[in-house]
Image (cartoon, rainbow, N blue to C red):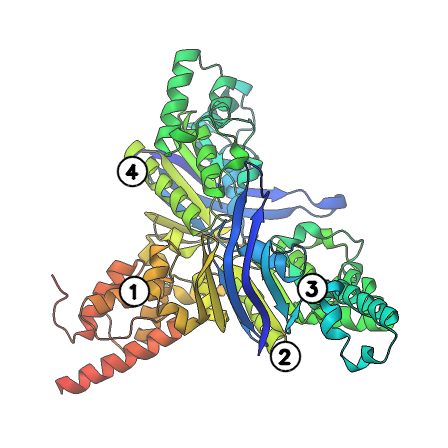
Amino acid sequence: MAETFIHAENLSFSYQGSNGGDDVPALKNITLDISKGEYVAILGHNGSGKSTFAKLLNLILEPTAGTLIVGGTDLSSGDLSDEELIALRRRVGMVFQNPDNQLVATIVEDDVAFGPENIGVPMPELRHRVDGALASVGMSEYADREPHHLSGGQKQRVAIAGIIAMRPECIVFDESTAMLDPLGRREVLDTIRMLNRENGITVINITHYMNEAALADRVIVINDGTVLMDGTPDEVFAQRDRLREVGLEVPQCAELIHRLREAGIPIEGTAISHVESCAELLAATLRGGEPAHG
Amino acid sequence: MDKIHLDHVSFTYSAGTPFEHQALDDVTVHIGASRITGVIGHTGSGKSTMMMLLNGLSKPTSGNVFLDGYDVNSTAKELYKTWLTLPEYRNLRKSTAKKAIRKEVEARKRRLCFRVGLVMQYPEYQLFEETVFKDIAYGPKNMGLSDEEIRERVLEAARFSGLDESLLEKSPFDLSGGQKRRVAIAGVIAMKPEVLVLDEPAAGLDPIGREQIFEEIRRYQRSTASSVIIVSHSMEDMAEYCDDMVVLSQSKVIAAGTCEEVFSKVSMLDEVGLDIPQITQLMRRLRKMGIDIPENVYTVDRAVEILKRYYQSQKGNLT
């Protein structure tokens, strides 16, 4: 079992009520562990509490109750020093939804250098980090461009490079592909996968897109501030009706398998999250029990 | 009958400067009346530019935009010759007739933005009034309608957009994101446009939110028989909710027609990097694996039907 990176136990968070009204609970007694190097997708409808969870991970919000330990640091104690807070935010980076709100400099490489420069990374090392970060998101040739001339997907990759330059252990993507077109989305998702597989970075991807969640190793479904499901994409998408009840759906492939089974066609197997595996399952049944090709 | 016809339309931004960019290149499109048309393409493919041409926000660099057969950018000067022979102008003195024609052309231009209603991307950022009611009423008020008519229209638009009447006196800023978006859509619907254009109406919504908003748009279209144009990146959504599709790539139209016609060119859509629906990918893959099924399947409903039939025929062969 890999080392635990995030440990949440009975974690709760409430937003303060406006105009002296009651507090609004957003997360209720969440208990879960995420290991180092995992690729986790978090699903939930608007207002389910999934973004709140993300914002607790690097103390943009402070837990109201319960325990939250991230990379060995206890975030729920409420007495982190400034140094500890800075160290935490270096280790857990966040990429947000709107590509236009995250870039601060007028030149791409200055933007990537902004974070490390602020924590005092000295010159030859800084250069090295910026170049490396831009290379890893495939944006080296844009180093001296102006960010506002880039496409949405390119901007998000620059934002990711800015975080990579901080040498984080974990990156949280909070609906980072929601405003991108299919090409931009693909660019960002490929980058996420590469960071996870090759650099061992723990990835938490909060998303509305089921096809995107299917790319993760593990899917956590949050509803009404609690963990409703937690498993592999195949395990989660097997529970179509429960997902539907909480305003979510399954990828089209999985939906097809569910509907054919309801119609009495005996499709064996559980690998329903991806086009390739679904095709194998279907072909096996449709050929009338002959083994799939190959 | 075409509701909208773009005839050899080109549009160039910042012509003659180093930033010159051709956003539309000789585009000819027919958009049917009383249908839902999906316009699909990547960022920068020219989709938004095309939308701006429809209600006169921009004029084409060359080519013509017709609404019900009338060139929306025509000038009085161009029309004198033909219109002077029309019964309503024929018997007037020439100078009076010319004046009347000029007036009519200008009136048509003004009416254009009410006839073609545009709902921009993330329209919830454009709300500004104190109450939801006032925000929805803004358009009809500008049309110079009576208070009674305005009230009727606001209520009807709110109903179409799935907004509860109890929300009308609230501040739009106290609503959720999805509700705000509905207010913005209602504000355009309240003008009763003949053509409703929506740019990414479901962007950023969760799956059920997406479904609801598309269902509402479809219900609105079916009950008003108006023409609806939806701009989107999502082939899956467009396949589900549109009658027709126009696919733009690099400033040109590369496919147009009914969804079925467009999806029959699925390999080409794949080539230009559009996200073809997962169900279409799956059915193509099965076909490649030797399962004899049609290739251009683009909805789950249709796939279920086809595979059920296939399975039954196979079973029949075995027994």
Residue that badge 1 annotates: B282
A193 displayed left or right of B14: left
Percent across and percent down for residue A105 are 55, 26
Residue that badge 2 annotates: B223
Using the image, name the chain to which the residue with label 3 belongs.
Answer: B
Using the image, name the chain to which the residue with label 4 belongs.
Answer: A
Question: Observer-nearest residue: B218 or A89?
Answer: B218
> Type of residue at label 2?
Ser
On-image quarter of the N terminus of chain A: top left
Q: CA distance from mark 4 to mark 2?
A: 51 Å
Dot 3 or dot 2: first in sequence order is: 3
> Type of residue at label 1?
Leu
Residue that badge 4 annotates: A197
Using the image, name the chain to which the residue with label 2 belongs.
Answer: B
Identify the element where label 4 is drawn.
helix
Residue that badge 3 annotates: B74
Comparing labels 1 and 4, the label whose residue is closer to the camera: 1
